[in-house]
Image (cartoon, rainbow, N blue to C red):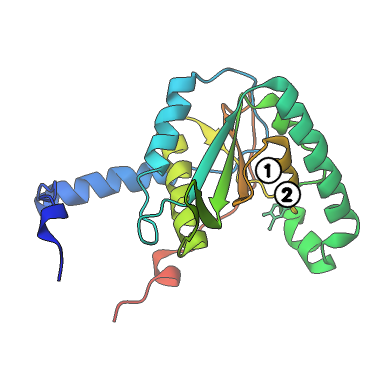
Amino acid sequence: MQNSESFIPLNFKELSAAESEKRITEFYSQCTTRRSVREFSDKDVPQHIIESIIKTAGTAPSGAHKQPWHFCAVKNPAIKSKIREAAEQEEYENYHGRMSKEWLEDLKKFGTDHIKPFLEIAPWLIVVFKEVYEQSEGGKATNYYVNESVGIATGMLLNAINMAGLVSLTHTPSPMNFLAEILERPKNERAYLLIPVGYPAEGTTVPDIKRKSLEEIMTIH
Ligand code: IYR
């Protein structure tokens, strides 16, 4: 039985179908402009915008409402340099032996390699950590559906960045253990994604790729 004392009314306003359609069409139009960008401008982004973006990500649902995420927003150039250096070392190994032939072939159209200048050029690096368990003063507690929860929060983060008129890259310089070390994170946290955020460099180009059609991604039953 639910404990009604701890429940509050849902904040909900019903929209007309026309208003619904208008809003989601606008939202889709905005979302469809999101592209992974690898060439950043060094133009600054005010900290309060980064804070609002991270607050948005923090509205994601999570297993048992444990909110098993932490976001490090890095603007310090010395820390960004350390991250670049460590990321490039891992990526060198990835591109020179750790990734399969098929994988390297799949990446050809993106023109990527182990050199990652954007890690120093972008004004902000957001490092997403997942909390594999909860650590409080009282001890350890279980977190649930951690990858799902943090994946949803990260998706919301990426859309928030796009909504704020900024660009990002979902970067995975695996293994990413160096991020917890450099950022001195507690033992219960593992790096999940490294996301440079900022403005695109002037004249930035992106691969000419297509998204799957609605028919390809949806079945009505
Ligand atoms: N982490 C490497 C390789 C890489 C892997 C995938 I899957 C991509 O979609 C893109 C890159 C890098 O960032 O270069």
Evaluate whether residue 33 shows in this view: no
Q: Residue at x 30, y 77 (%)?
A: 220
Which residue corresponds to mark 1?
180
Which amino acid lies under the numbered mark 1 shown in the image of this protein? Ala
Q: Which mark is residue 145?
A: none
Residue 35 sits above or below residue 99 on the image: above
Query: Element at badge 1?
Result: helix
Which residue corresponds to mark 2?
177
Q: Residue furthest right?
A: 96
Instruction: Please indicate whether residue 60 sits to the left or right of residue 177 in the image.
Output: left
Q: Residue furthest front?
A: 138
Rendering coords of residue 154 (x, y %): 49, 48
Which amino acid lies under the numbered mark 2 shown in the image of this protein? Asn
Mark 1 Cα shell of 10 Å, populated few (<14), some (14-19), many (≥20): some
Task: State the separation of the CA atoms marked 2 and 1.
Answer: 6 Å
Label 1 near label 2: C-beta < 8 Å?
yes
- Res. 17 image quadrant: bottom left
Q: Residue at x 74, y 53 (%)?
A: 174
Instruction: Please indicate whether residue 29 sits to the left or right of residue 122 in the image.
Output: left
Residue 154 sits above or below residue 37 on the image: below
Q: Give the quarter of the figure containing the N terminus.
A: bottom left
Mark 2 Cα shell of 10 Å, populated few (<14), some (14-19), many (≥20): some
Evaluate whether residue 86 shows in this view: yes
